[in-house]
Image (tube, coloured by chain):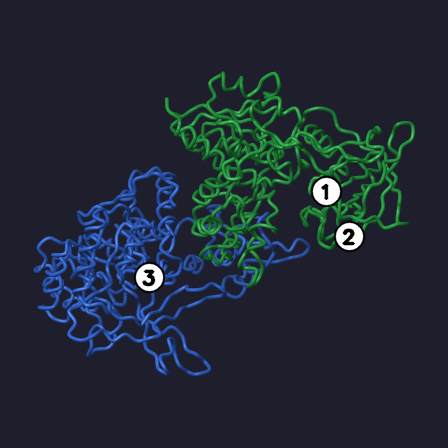
Chain colours: A green, B blue
Amino acid sequence: MSNGQSDALGGLTDTQATLEASRCLMCEDPPCVAACPARVPVKHFIRALRFGCPRRAVNLIRQQNILAGVCGLACPVEELCVGACTGTDLATPVAIGKLQHYAAVTEIRSGREGLAGPGDGRRVAIIGAGPSGLAAAAELARRGHLPTVFEKDRRPGGICTYGAPADRVPQALLTGEIEYIKSLGVEIRTASPIDRNNTIDDLIADGYQAVYVGTGLQRAATPHVPGAELEGVVTWRQLLHRASAFSLGEGDKPTVASQVIVVGGGGVAVDAACTALELGADDVDVVCLEGPHEMPACRDEVDKAWQTGVRFHTRSMPIEVTGANGKVTGLNAIRIRWAEPGRFIPSNADPIEGTEYWLPGATVVFAVGAAPATELADALPGVDVDVTGRIIADVDTGATSRSGVYAGGDAVSGGGTTIVKAIAEGKRAGEAIDAHLRGMTG
Amino acid sequence: MITHNRDLSIEFCSIRFPNPFLLSAAPPTDDLDMVRAAFEAGWGGAVLKTTSVETQPVDLVYPMMSALHFDGQRIMGLGNIDLISEHHIDVVEARARTLKTEYPDRVVAVSIMGSSKQQWQELVRRLEATGVDFVECSFSCPQGSMGEEPGAMLAQSADATERVAGWVKQAAARCPIVIKITPQVTDVVKVAQAVKRGGADAICAANTIPSLMGVDVDTFVPYPDVQGSSTYSGLSGPATKPITLRTLAEIAKNVDLPITATGGPVTWRDAVEMMLVGAGTVQFCTAVMHYGLDIIDDLQDGLAFYLDDKGFDRPGDIVGRALSRIVSHDKLPRDAKTVSSLIEERCVKCDLCYIACRDGGHQAIKIEAPDRLPKIDPDRCPGCRLCVTVCPADALTMVRKQETPDDAGARTPADNDRI
């Protein structure tokens, strides 16, 4: 039995996990489960760990969340399960994320494979090997279908592979979980984009009887700020995708200036700031509308960024990217107050006259939102999208305007879907597709 | 929800159990709906709480529960001053019949207790007629069983055990008869042999252990406090497991009778341990009262994965596997010496091994600057293993000490005694 954390999977030791699990009160109707978008049976998986059966623990988690280990690390647990833990009222909440990660890596280390479904079902195409696509594929495979995942990038994982700084989710963990998904009977084809030249009509002509679209966000929002066209302005998505690809040995190292300015207060802004530091920036300034306690970014992530030297300029809005000779030289910003307290949206921000300031920097990263790729619609004939390019889908089933085509994750929400929520949506769509296919005759 | 797909059925006294786990005769089996819920949850069987042929109502006392907590963990042991079921034999009969009709694939048993030959035999005949799979005879309830002799139990007398087991067996036409004994005897083997001589089919080992649960040091009233008075409780729960294991092993090694275990199991591992020392099935009570009926899922998955990992086909294949490893103290090997050894990367430098060895062992561990890691002197360490048991980080292990012939030759007789 392994008691160490010396391999790349890391995590709690057996001893640490035993001690932590022993603190769970194992309540009836546990609030941690209600707080989990994927409804992971936290009480029961912790009890399984505590009663000496990690294999049962991971089976229970994977029933609901196929990327158990990834989410154990990447979930904003303070805002979800851990934030709801009953144990908080007695002492401190149970480290549910760490225990979930422990269960997952214990099983990955065992090298055990999943039980493939009977495989007597229908062929289903999954577009995008991100969290929601993988969850949909796993659910379908378990129900006996034959899912094939089409991924445009060279590796599966979506945001888990290309989105966040490389140290957020160890690749060994993601690879282990993806291998498990494959062992269920899921085929993953990388470097296989679905686009205007190869649409879902072609997939259906090839014999796929249903389609799940989990393409996430392919395009960062274009900021309406003068100077946004200057050389040196990039989007968070470009920066993070290139940085992740580089860390995976794909492509050149992205260059950033010694002074970098990141605009935005969400998780991707903090990711972009940290990534800029890792890529060699000396100074990173984050400019965001929200105050320190209003930022949508996870508190832990903000603290971590702060500790590594990122400077935050809160309750500020960008006015103009300044430049010389077509290149960025810095950013003009201004302090704001909220016209109406408590509504942290741009239209509610009042600039405070006379508080303009200028930050120097030759790289400006916009991390102010994103949208599904506009060209996505060309690949999805018959699927309705809204004006911003988001797919219109049923909140419960993911069903779109085209029969047999389902969607979930950021491609539907337009951004801000956590990994765990995307997985929950993918699983639910998998269930709905199964019901749809079973309802079909012939 | 279970996550395995393995057959866990087992045969015990020619009865097929869907899995080796059943509820013992206790509060969780004293209500029809509770037993239904247990069967819905997946329990393989249930022994309905002990019934008798009462001439007057069972006079229960409340509060009846108290517990041994230890160092922040609740219910190391549970004490009760409960009595037999307060429901009339007619009610229990009807329940048994209903359950057997509704759940023909589950094992339904009833526990009985009589005070005369006529009562014991009447109980067996009446309950057998309900279709139950076996009848369990409580020779061992620590509370109120013998009336005139407080605390004395039928199963504390080998002669009485043999005689009453014989009455019961004589009255049984079809049902296997299981005798539930107490661990509170000088020689449990003698009692088990008496069960066998009496003709019973199996032994249930063992009932709760007579105990005094604690004393309120402010009021001087022991627990549970019944309006200023208290009495001895029957102790169950995890604290009793080692006693149960010993009882099981002694019986299994000496008496050829199937055993259904009870006394302290919580996890699948506890149940497997009990099976390894001879139990064919395992009965649960305190764990269910503490954690709920759905621990049956944990038990079934745990056993299934254990059998997978070990390459066993059926739960029955593990029964008694540890028995040959239990020998009398004088037969234990004394030649190869092991000593304590540190796994450095796990050590958290709490010094607990040092304290234990210094004050309860052999002063074989030193803590020294600059690294403050425990240093074990293999020449001073006789390998008692106290340090391993106190280490909170699983950082100590026992290793074989490489002894040279010179070392062996240099030993004094006193050294040999110590080893």
Which label sits on residue A270? 1
* Residue A324 in view here: yes
Between A58 and A52, the residue placed more toward the observer is A58
Are labels 1 and 3 assigned to the same chain? no
Residue A112: give x, y in percent of width and height. Answer: 45, 34
Pointer 3 indicates a residue of which chain?
B
Q: Quadrant of residue A419?
A: top right
| Chain of the residue on which disc 1 is drawn | A
On residue A339, which mark appears? 2
Residue type of the residue flagged with mark 1:
Val
Give the SS element for disc 3: helix
B288 or B358, nearer to the observer: B288
Query: Which of label 1 and label 3 is nearer to you?
Result: 1
Percent position (x, y) of residue A69?
55, 40
State the CA–CA distance, disc 1 to disc 3.
Answer: 58 Å
Q: Closer to the camera: disc 2 or disc 1?
A: 2
Give the structural element (helix, strand or loop) at label 2.
loop
